[in-house]
């Protein structure tokens, strides 16, 4: 899967909506706040789809990049595989995967803010003169 494939699918998604009569190029261009000629050139491949316009399209149709993937592609990337993106990370020696730490205060390795009562107030360098 390459990014150009996702761009092509997003353009095909828009072309399908226009072909189905859900929008006209002009009406969609207004909704996306671009000119109709600019949208037309993007849809015909005469102009590149910018990331800004792609973001506007995704937001307008309330879809994400995951919606552009096909079922087999999703299964490959979301199924745990040995060494795949969803495979469990190896744990360091001495870490119990079943232990639960409820707060950073219980784990000394995690830095956390001290309560206000434990901090000392700062002295101001500003002093009032008479």
Image: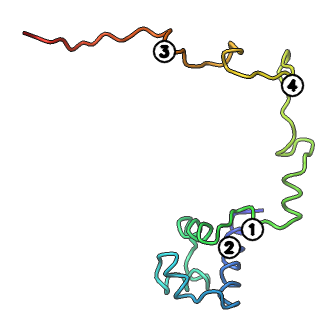
Of labels 2 and 1, earlier in sequence is: 2
Discs 2, 1 touching: Cβ within 8 Å: yes
Q: Are discs 2 and 3 less than 8 Å apart at CB?
A: no
- Residue under label 2: 10
Residue at 57% over, 80% down: 42
Few, some or many residues within 10 Å of mark 4 (<14, 14–19, 20+): few
Q: Work out whether mark 2 precedes mark 3 in sequence or the reverse, and give the earlier one.
A: 2
Calculate the distance from the C-alpha at mark 2 to the C-alpha at mark 4.
Answer: 41 Å
**Pointers 3 and 4 in contact (CB under 8 A)?**
no
| Residue at image mark 4 | 97
Expressed as whole percent of the image width and height from the top left, the position of residue 107 reads 71, 15
The residue beneath circle 1 is 68
Q: Secondary structure at mark 3?
A: helix
**In which quadrant will I find the C terminus?**
top left
Of circles 1 and 4, the one toward us is 4
| Residue 43 position in % (x across, y down) | 61, 83
């Amino acid at each position: 899967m390459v990014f150009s494939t996702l761009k092509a699918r997003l353009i095909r998604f828009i072309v399908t909506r226009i072909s189905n009569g859900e929008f006209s190029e002009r009406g969609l261009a207004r909704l996306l706040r671009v000119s109709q000629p600019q949208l037309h050139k993007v849809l015909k491949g005469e102009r590149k789809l910018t990331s800004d316009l792609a973001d506007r399209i995704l937001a307008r149709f309330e879809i994400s990049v995951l919606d552009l993937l096909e079922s087999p592609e999703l299964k490959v990337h979301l199924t745990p595989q040995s060494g795949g993106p969803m495979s469990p990370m190896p744990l360091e020696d001495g870490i119990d995967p079943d232990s639960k730490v409820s707060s950073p205060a219980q784990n000394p390795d995690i830095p956390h803010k001290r309560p206000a009562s434990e901090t000392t107030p700062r002295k101001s360098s500003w002093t009032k003169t008479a």
